[in-house]
Each structure stands twice: as C-alpha cells, then as structure tokens.
Amino acid sequence: MRELIERWHRGWCAARGLNGVEDLGDGLRVRCLQPGRDVEYVALSDAAVPELAARVLGEREVTWLTVATTSPEAAAEALAGAGLVLLKRAEQLMTVVLADHPSSKPADPYQLEVVRVGAAVTATVRESSTGEEAARGTIGLSGPDGVADRIETLPAHRRRGLASVVMGALAEAAREEGAANGILVASEDGQHLYRRLGWHTVADVLIATAPGG
C-alpha cells in the first residue's frame, strides 16, 4: 500500500504542478496552496497518523491530512483521538490497467481537445458553436503511472457521457506517453463512473484537519 500511495502522490503533484515534497519517513508533506488548503500531509501507513496529526495541529496555515487505508473505522478513530476533525471519509483510492480502459468520442455538438504541458495532460470537452467548456480533467504522468485528477462536468452538460469521454482521452494520452497504470482518488460522486470504466477500489481515503481549519 505504501508504494501505491507514493506513486499516487507523485502523479497528483505532476497533475497540479507541485514541487518540494518533503519525505517525513512515514508521511509526505507538500505546500500545495490549493483551494481550501495551504498544506497537505499524506500518511504512508496507518501507524503514522498520530505523529502526522500532531504536525497538522502545529501548522499555522490551513492543513489537511490524507489517509489511504484498508481499515477506515480504525483510522477515523485514530484521527479523532489525535484531535483532528474529519472533512471527508467516503473517497476511495482506485486503480486500472490503462490498456483495458475504454474510450469514446463526444457526440454533437461537442468537441474534444487534449493538451500536454510538462508532465500534465488536460482533456477538455467544449460546445462546438460557442466554445463553452463542458467537461475537463487532467492526468499527471509519473513513470509507468498516470494519475487522473479534477475530473469535472459542468452542471448544464451533465448526463451526456462527457466525463467518460474525458477519462478515455486521458487514459489514451497516458498510454501514448508510456504509462501502463491508472491511479486516482475518487470522490463519492465519481466512484460509480470509474467503476463502470473498469477502475477498482484499493483503499478508503479519509481527509482530516485541525478543528476550525
């Protein structure tokens, strides 16, 4: 599990253009400056939760602790016992063999564009006549892995299969760059889509922060 979490984190940082990850032994720290949080810690084992929670409580900026675990109830108790509050407890760490990932083309009136910048590939679906963005997503490239991130369909364009188009385009782009494995952390809303596309759950993901954080 530790290796998979590290691989996910490297690809996630690539997707978001983040650098300067600190290796704390049983955890990782990155100053991410993302919406809603400035710093994020990632536990590489359940045993690391108390120590990392203490670090979170010592931060002056808004800080999250992310824990991927196969024992979510015990992890939730450990986080609460260490003085943190849960923000999310229904996300999942998922994987797929990219060679098996389905792909599809957008139907009219939509068109797809795929752009690589550095180690990140972004797929965007737009309404053809207006250029309005309808759906988007990014995949971070890290060696044999492609880590999908921030997959979103805008409300006016939902239930038209556009998220599947985005996911298929990202998988194809990652394969073309030599990646064999797909990894992501799925929100509760996205899990049904990813399962339908062949992704498999490996662990539950809990996210906690300091009280009032």
Image (tube, grey):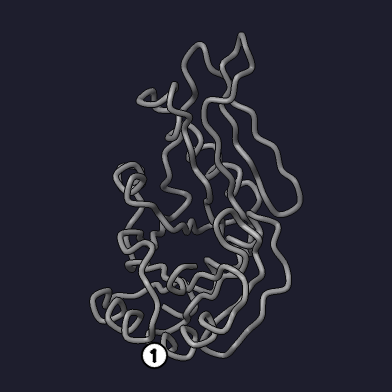
Q: Callout 1: few (<14), some (14-19), or many (20+) C-alpha neighbours within 10 Å?
A: few
Q: Nearer the viewer, residue 108 or 58?
A: 58
Vertical side of 181 occupied by 59: above or below: below
Quarter of the image that includes the N terminus: bottom left
Res. 115 image quadrant: top right
The correct choice, above or below, for 203 with respect to 125 in the image is below
Q: Which residue is mark 1?
A: 47
Query: What is the residue that sits farthest to the left in this orientation?
Result: 73
- For residue 184, above or below residue 190: below
Residue at 48% across, 29% down:
154
* SS class, disc 1: helix
Image position of 11 (left or right of 118): left
User: In the image, is residue 49 above or below residue 105?
Assistant: below
Q: Residue at x 59, y 31 (%)?
A: 124
Quadrant in the picture for residue 202: bottom left
Q: Amino acid at mark 1?
A: Ala
Toward the right, the furthest residue is: 118
Residue 16: x %, y % from top left: 65, 55
x and y, in percent, of residue 41 in the image: 54, 75
